[in-house]
Image (cartoon, rainbow, N blue to C red):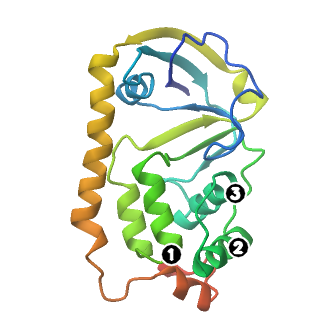
Amino acid sequence: MVKRIYRGSAARIEQPVFGAGNPSNDYGLGFYCTESLDLALELAVDDERGGFANAYDIQMDGLDVLDLSAGGTCCDLQWLAVLLENRTFDTASALAREAKDFLLANFLPDYRDRDVIVGYRADDSYFAFAQDFISGGISYRQLGNAMRLDELGLQFVVKSRRAFERLEFVEAVAARSDEWAASRRARDAQARHAYLDAERHRRQRGDLFIAQIIDEEMRLDDPRLR
């Protein structure tokens, strides 16, 4: 099966380089893409300059794919554990530090040697949602709902050399700053607004918070985490 993916960038990238990039991205070193052309166009620009949505085809047959999204077999705590290992969180509080240690010890999946990882982006608002959860501000249910607010919130990350070798450049679609930078800001603002309205102040009976998950030493097979 061939999948079309896109990478938003300031420049054309006809030949992605294995091993290049920022090792502190959400899922570590990799080539971060999306299956949405519109999202790639937004990510390609900032307020000062335009960019390109670079399009690639990748042959998926035989690749080892880890799906950290709701459509996969992982739970949201596994996605969060990967994020905690790679991104810098504010762990000033004792609860946040304990939460980080607990999640890394009990929910970190084997992700480093996968060919491809599919999962939620942790940009801007979405990183704040994760921070709220480990600090005890929102429940596990609220975290999951927040991550699913943006239908374009998934990223497709090419991790292994084998997967890189299957990338075939298709085209580079030009993105204008005056069009797509505003769209990017609007998407983030919409996510924040929806989160504040629908989630932050609406605790439900039976909601699981990180303190309870730690105290009860919950594990991956706990049905309350699915």
User: Can you say whether 12 is above or below 20 in the image?
Assistant: above
Task: Find disc 3 in the rendering and name its residue.
Answer: 85
Residue beneath the point at 66% across and 69% down: 107
| Distance CA(mark 3)–CA(mark 1) | 20 Å
Q: Please say whether residue 70 is visible from this viewpoint.
A: no
Q: Which amino acid, by three-letter code, is at mark 1?
A: Leu
| Residue 138 point in image, percent of width and height | 40, 74
| Distance CA(mark 1)–CA(mark 2) | 18 Å
Secondary structure of the residue carrying tag 2 is helix
| Residue 110 point in image, percent of width and height | 74, 56
User: Can you say whether 16 is above or below 223 in the image?
Assistant: above
User: Can you say whether 192 is above or below 172 in the image?
Assistant: below
Task: Find disc 1 in the rendering and name its residue.
Answer: 225
- Residue 102 lies in what quarter of the image? bottom right
Residue beneath the point at 59% across and 13% down: 13
- Residue 82 lies in what quarter of the image? bottom right
User: Which mark is first along the chain, 1 or 3?
Assistant: 3
Q: Nearer the viewer, mark 1 or mark 2?
A: 2
Q: Which amino acid, by three-letter code, is at mark 2?
A: Asp
Q: Residues within 10 Å of mark 1 (few under 14, many from 20)?
A: some
Label disc, if present, on residue 101 of the rendered structure = 2
